[in-house]
Amino acid sequence: MERRGLVPGPDFEYFRRRYFTPAEVAQHNRPEDLWVSYLGCVYNLTPLVQEYKGNLQLKPILEVAGQDISHWFDPKTKDIRKHVDPLTGCLRYRTPRGRFVHVPPQLPRSDWANDFGKPWWKRSQYEVGRLSAKTRNICIVNTLTSQEHVLEVGALESVWEILHRYLPYNAHAASYTWKYEGKNLNMNCTLEENGIRDEEEEFDYLNMDSTLHTPAVLLYFNDDLTEL
């Protein structure tokens, strides 16, 4: 189907998000929809939970659904942190919440199978994107309808990615010209690169509430409707 009015940019039918905010990860906190983040990336562990459904070793993972578990890992090796086991004197994975899926038992056991290949934390197939280390709020104003929406976005997201976030509020978002202070935005650049400064630190320095001022991007309709 012809996409009328679509300004040059990515094909949103195949578009894949690069960044997710901690608040977005926190929404995926159920066994049937379980995400976690660690070492700067976001992982969808739902297939793992389905594969091991009913296994008691899922309990530590279920307890941290929607959370950041970077403290489980050694940032240098990107492996689970290790310690010297006081019982065996051997170097073992440190699992204060209890042993979880793919972590070997403390002592040899005949009922433990290690034929699963790479452990889940070393598999790239679960990765869905990167965790936004810094987020900011942006107000998007549709000048045609006078509707305003405040979005929390990652500081490193391009305006195209922000447009993708905005689609649930306006399916024709790509049929608008995006402007800030009268200037067209470069859709491939971040807000900061477009001159929209994040002044949260300055507000904090002045002991002021940063929510009192949210920069606004104005959307101007381009006549043709394009639904993505």
Image (spheres, rainbow, N blue to C red):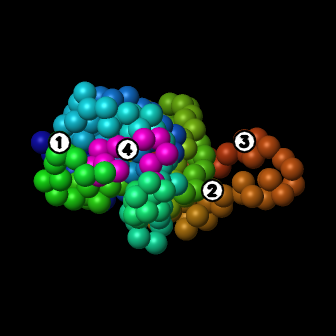
Q: Which mark is residue 211?
A: 3
Residue 206 appears left or right of 69: right
Residue designated by label 2: 181
Q: CA distance from mark 4 to mark 1?
A: 15 Å
Residue displayed at 84% across by 47% down: 208
Crowding around mark 2 (Cα neighbors within 10 Å: few <14, some 14 to 19, many 20+) is: few
Residue 59 appears left or right of 185: left
Disc 3 element: helix
- Observer-side mark, 3 or 4, equals 4
Choose top left, top right, bottom left or bottom right for residue 41: bottom left
Which callout, 3 or 1, points at the residue further toward the start of the chain? 1
- Observer-side mark, 3 or 1, equals 1
Total numbered labels: 4
Q: Is residue 218 above or below residue 142?
A: below
Residue designated by label 4: 99
Residue 157 appears left or right of 194: left
Q: Is residue 102 magenta?
A: yes
